[in-house]
Image (cartoon, rainbow, N blue to C red):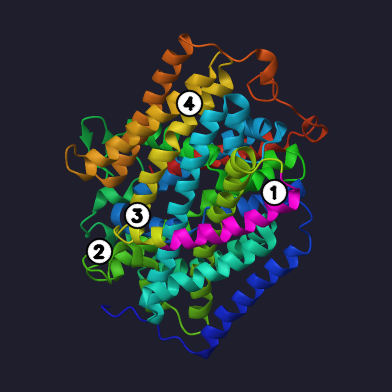
Amino acid sequence: MDEVRLDTNFVDYLIVASYFVVVLGVGFAAKRYIKSSLDYFLSGRSLPAWITGLAFISANLGATEVLGMAANGAQYGVATVNYYWIGAIPAMVFLGLVMMPFYYGSKVRSVPEYLLLRFNKASHQFNSWTFAIATILIAGVNLYALALVLKFLLGWPIILGIVVAAVIVAVYITLGGLSSAIYNEVLQFFVILAALIPISLIGLHDIGGWNGLQDRFKDTDVGEAGLHALQGTGIGDVVNPIGVSWIGIVFGLGFVLAFGYWTTNFAEVQRALSAKDMSAAERTPLIGAIPKLFLPFVMILPGMIALVVIPKLGTTDDLQYNNAIPLLMNKYLPNGMLGIALTGLMASFMAGVAANVSAFNTVVTTGLVEPYFKPGQPDEWYVRFGRIATVGGIAISIFTALIASTYDNLMNYLQALFSIFNAPLFATFIIGMFWKRMTPAAGLWGLIAGTIAAAATFIFYKTKVIHFGSDLAESMVGASLAFIVDAIVSVLVTLGTTPKPVSELQGLVYGMANTDESVATSHTPLILGAFVLVGAAVLTIVFW
């Protein structure tokens, strides 16, 4: 298994080429409906909930999810499910039921724009810049992952794979804006599942089902501890493979990292903001949460299977954990199915790039250029600049892909980015939404202090000044520190500065949210939220 190259033929290449034609066709079709900047950046706020819901979850199914979660499955085993049932579902429900009324009701075009209305220009500028940096770094992860797979599977040079993927995404986002990204993400969702489900089923059958996998997994270096979600996480007696206690998992991952990502990451929130009304906006993350419940069975499971059927996985460059999915494709799938699986991988990476680049062009245009650098321009000028920002963002992502290349597990890198950029932002948001007294100055200085705390934790860990059980443990602790520092600084600064008048907080704080007729009589969001929370709790208990 040292040779990872796929035995692809004409049929496989035809499937991949057909997919690229469809993706570009969607971009050209969407371009016909771009009449204003609202159409380009937020699809004219006109999309139904099932479209935005599938796009919401598909935007999360980038390389870091598909390759990274499989890598975590091989490295940490069942414990990785905590990133779904504890580290995603509750936060997605909170976004839909609690935060979307503020985002959608205030008519902001981006997450940073909410900070402008709630606090001041300084906090808005700081978050716009940090968010722009974060999205480009994450887009680079997806570009690198696609290039990595193309190199190992098809023999393409890394740089060729990066450039080809970058050009295709740049074309369809530049043409059709967010609508193009969203409709392609719905298509990509089904293509990704078509790629991953056969790998999981064939792999399980090969090793004797779930019981056979458990028996063989116990003989790996991860061992029995890797077959449980929360067992072995007691304080002072941590034997769980992730190397962190239940406090780190529940507070660091389940609260700070998860809520920080799902509630403030504009690449996700942007999909809900494009919904046709507030009810659809609330249902967007809740609809996305339904497939999220079951994704571990096609994301994490292949990594665990790879660990027991691929000798020496995780010991060489070709056999690094990131290659668990490609290695299983190579082992199990015939021609034709190989083409579908390869298309699924490319779809996931392109979804990840597109989600972040479409968020990048919106924040740069509406959050920086329009208010601070070129105010008062005609609407079509901002659409044109948004297209330029798309191309520029893609170009920069090609270089940030090189940073991602230094990690053998992409999810570790991604979680480090979330702890630095999203965790402090969540603290500022949650305190500012629920505490009217929080001042504009506190919004800025809390955000800066939290970001510095997380970045310092990461730097000290990488320079071996401090030590943690794993890279994931560092991101959980770093996120927790960022939240705590941000909260403390926000409270202290608030006590010494002047708050905004309550009259200026309409639609921005708890108890003063704007609403519309679509949510006045509908109980659907509450029912959906209860369903997925109960589902997550049951699955966590089953795999305890």
- x and y percentages locating residue 32 in the rendered image: 78, 64
Residue occupied by mark 2: 314
- In this view, the residue in front, 425 or 535, is 425
Residue 241 percent coordinates (x, y): 26, 47
Q: Amino acid at mark 3?
A: Asn
Mark 4: few/some/many CA within 10 Å (<14, 14-19, 20+) = many
Q: Residue at the spot x=58%, y=80% of the render? A: 17
Image side of residue 85 versus residue 286, left or right: left
Name the front one of labels 4 and 3: 4
Left or right: 172 with respect to 517?
left
Whether 396 is among the magenta residues is: yes
Q: Image height check: is 154 above or below 359?
A: below
Residue at image mark 1: 42
Nearest the viewer among 418 and 386 is 386
> From mark 2 to mark 1, how far is it between C-alphas?
42 Å
Nearer-N-terminus badge (1/4): 1
**What mark, if any, has residue 72 been given in the picture?**
3
Q: Marks 1 and 3, Cα distance to the nearest angstrom?
A: 34 Å
Badge 2 vs badge 1, beta-carbon distance below 8 Å: no
Which residue corresponds to the image point at 66% horizontal and 74% vertical from the top-left? 22
CA gap between label 2 and label 4 equals 42 Å
State the residue at coordinates (38%, 39%).
420
Quadrant containing the N terminus is bottom left
Mark 4 sits on what residue? Answer: 444
Q: Which residues are magenta?
A: 377-398
Magenta span includes 193: no
**CA gap, disc 4 and disc 3:** 35 Å
Question: What's the residue type where badge 4 is placed?
Answer: Leu
What kind of residue is marked 1? Answer: Leu
Whether tag 2 and tag 4 are in contact, CB under 8 A, the answer is no
